[in-house]
Amino acid sequence: MSESKTKSDHNHHHRGKSSEIFLDKNKILANLPIVPSQVILDAGCGNGYMAKEFAKLTGKMGKVYALDPDTVSIDILRTETVGTNIEAFIGDITKQTELTTSSIDLVYISTVIHGFSGTQMAGFVNEVKRLLKSNGKLAIVEIKKEDTPFGPPLNMRFSPEELRTIIDLNPTQLVEVGEYFYMQLFGK
Ligand SMILES: C[S@@+](CC[C@H](N)C(=O)[O-])C[C@H]1O[C@@H](n2cnc3c(N)ncnc32)[C@H](O)[C@@H]1O
């Protein structure tokens, strides 16, 4: 990625923001290879609305980890998900998390990485590679790198082509998931 893209560019705030109303949730779910008993990580889960969908699909034998550095979001999600297969915890996906190596079938990360510096992006890729099982998948949902009525400055965004260059996993599908968003999938 461009070295000129630094954390100091990150002058917008995520707290309390969700892309939920702009994303085509059904299209996202239809294009994710989720089956019962899987283990999924929703990295940067925010209010956890997708973690809750993943929990329905993975079922009682599955597990959904919902990670976010925002303590308020995690506290609320923990309260809401008591007794479910969702485990919400505070963490940073750009660093090594408390999760076990090769334990995750799918890492899902939606509208989070545009805030990452080059160092954070490298840390994120390392951690995803550590966490994924050999047949695991990574799904990145991001805002398109074009004029949109909202969203971060264009120089903070990644096009799918840029992601495919930066992330040394095997790109598979690219899907439009709402007027302003795409989902790029990768295999290990
Ligand atoms: C725009 S919100 C998106 C929330 C949710 N994924 C969605 O699609 O609505 C970005 C989220 O990423 C979280 N976040 C920011 N930096 C992160 C990091 N290094 N690791 C994990 N989550 C992070 C923020 O706390 C925030 O909840």
Image (cartoon, grey):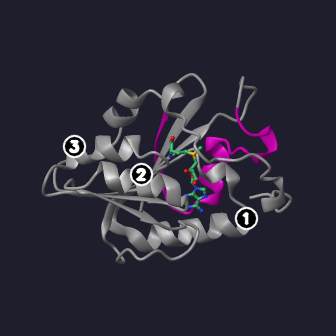
Visible in this render: residue 7? yes
Distance (Cα) linking label 3 and label 1: 34 Å
Camera-side residue: 121 or 22?
22
Disc number placed over residue 76 in the picture, else none: 2
Disc 3: CA contacts within 10 A as few (<14), some (14-19) or many (>=20): some
Q: Where in the figure is residue 43, as x and y percent of width and height?
A: 47, 57
Q: Where in the figure is residue 162, as x and y percent of width and height?
A: 67, 49
Start-end of magenta stretch: 151-175
Q: Where in the figure is residue 37, as x and y percent of width and height?
A: 16, 56
Camera-side residue: 44 or 35?
44
Camera-side residue: 11 or 156?
11
Disc 1: CA contacts within 10 A as few (<14), some (14-19) or many (>=20): some
Q: In what element is the residue under mark 2?
A: helix
Distance (Cα) linking label 2 and label 3: 22 Å
Mark positioned earlier in the residue sequence (3 or 1): 3
Closer to the eye: label 3 or 1? 3
Does the beta carbon at disc 2 come under 8 Å from ligand 1? no
Q: Is residue 168 magenta?
A: yes
Disc number placed over residue 118 in the picture, else none: 1
Q: Which residue is mark 3?
A: 57
Q: Amino acid at mark 2?
A: Ile
Are discs 2 and 1 less than 8 Å apart at CB? no
In the image, residue 59 above or below residue 153: below
The quadrant in which the N terminus is found is bottom right
Distance (Cα) linking label 2 and label 1: 31 Å
Q: Amino acid at mark 1?
A: Gly
Closer to the eye: label 2 or 3? 2
Q: Where in the figure is residue 170, as x and y percent of width and height?
A: 47, 56
